[in-house]
Amino acid sequence: MSDRIVIIGAGQAGAQAVASLRGEGYQGALTMVGDEAYPPYQRPPLSKTYLAGTFERERLFLKPDAFYADAKCEVILGARATHIDRGNRVVTLSDGRTLSYDKLLLATGSRVRRIPIPGSDLDGVHYLRDIADVDRLRPAFVKGARLAVVGGGYIGLEVAAVALKYGLQVDVFEAMDRVMARAVSPVVSAFYERVHREAGVRFHLRTGVEAILGKGQVEGVRAGGETHPADLALVGIGVVPNEELAREAGLGCDDGIVVNEFAETGDPAIYAAGDCTRHIGRDGHPVRLESVQNAIDQAKHAALAMMGKHTPYKEVPWFWSDQYDLKLQIAGLAWPDDQTVLRGDPAARKFAVFHLREGRVAAVESVNAAPEYLVGRKLIAEGKAIAPEKLADTAIPMKNIS
């Protein structure tokens, strides 16, 4: 059994690993290192209720401080790992400290993708990934202010929804031909575009932002060859995995730290979990997931593997987004050539889209339709073939579909 386990990353995966290791009976020394000033906290509320001011900061934290003390876990904050000496099993931190390890968990997460255009360094250009980002953004949410949202994905649309509640004027610029194109089906994209337009959002699809304009402060954006006035900009164009530490240590990386079904890297002493990893998904294809579910479940499996209890990671991935009074819940991973089945009426603001692959439910997208999501998730896990007409028939309760 290891005498010391070091966890690099104080996020959802890191916190779960601490809980799982102690829960599985690990008695050795345990250290968690985080580069932020805060212990592990939830990120999903940041672009929703925390930005809206309806979710207090204290509620963001995943565990009370006493949890780490009770777990006898040393927590080092405000420091990042800069080097891994695999031969001697030593990690060097940015403050000069070194930590020896018997087993190492990389839970380094991801960071926002920066936009490489003129004006991206102006005051008033914001990203949203951590508490400090929201604390900088919220004071700029003044009634009548003009917000340019660059990117029509989850973050961009969630921020747009909150901004409208503050009375801002919102323009969303999306390079692709529909919103949330990488995450949802065309039916769901069209529904959310309509809802946002009705709420007052102006969309500019197939329109990339070429420059952010202003003298010291944001005054507008140039997109599609035209100038659009703006007082601030929120850039939400995705995230990139924090894999540099692993790559420099010689570990396999491919848009994420490559791990097997047990969250093991190519080094038997090093594991990885969460947004920073690439693993083989349930469908047999390599995938990197950016979700709370993946961070939690993969960290659990990493902890089990470190304890010699190897259990393959085959969980059904799930995701969600809150916009206005709408809860979007997704389970599974859809493919472009899946057969889609619509259940319910989007006009009623309550419906679901099922994705069938070889007759089996591979994914489900539900809007304000919890039964469809919950049963759909179960059907994905079971891998049963379901008749499309049965899924589409709202006269049949979801609980009776199996």
Image (spheres, helix red, strand yellow):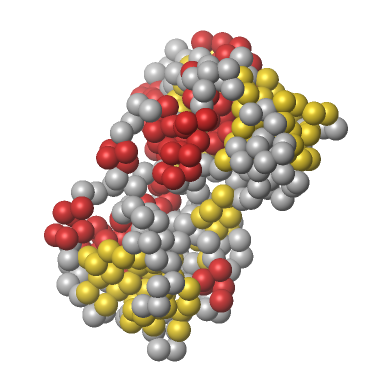
Residue 166 to residue 67: above or below: above
Q: Residue 216, percent across and down? A: 67, 41
Which is nearer the eye, 279 or 358? 279
Residue lying at 41% horizontally and 61% vertically, measured from the top left: 35
User: Which residue is painted at 58% across and 55% down in the image?
Assistant: 240
In the image, 196 versus 52, the foreground residue is 52
Q: Residue at x 35, y 26 (%)?
A: 54
Up-down relation of residue 12 to residue 309 (above or below): above
Viewport quadrant of the C terminus: top left
Pick the quarter of the image with the N terminus: bottom left
Q: How many numbered dots are placed on residues in this image? A: 0
Q: Is residue 285 visible?
A: yes
Residue found farthest to the right: 225
- Residue at 22 percent across and 74 percent down: it is 29
The vertical placement of 55 against 273, above or below, is above
Q: Quadrant of residue 123?
A: top right
Residue 303 pos. (x, y %): 31, 65
Q: Is residue 379 visible?
A: no
Q: Residue 7: x and y, percent?
A: 35, 67
Q: Nearer the viewer, residue 46 or 154?
A: 46
Image quarter of residue 207: top right
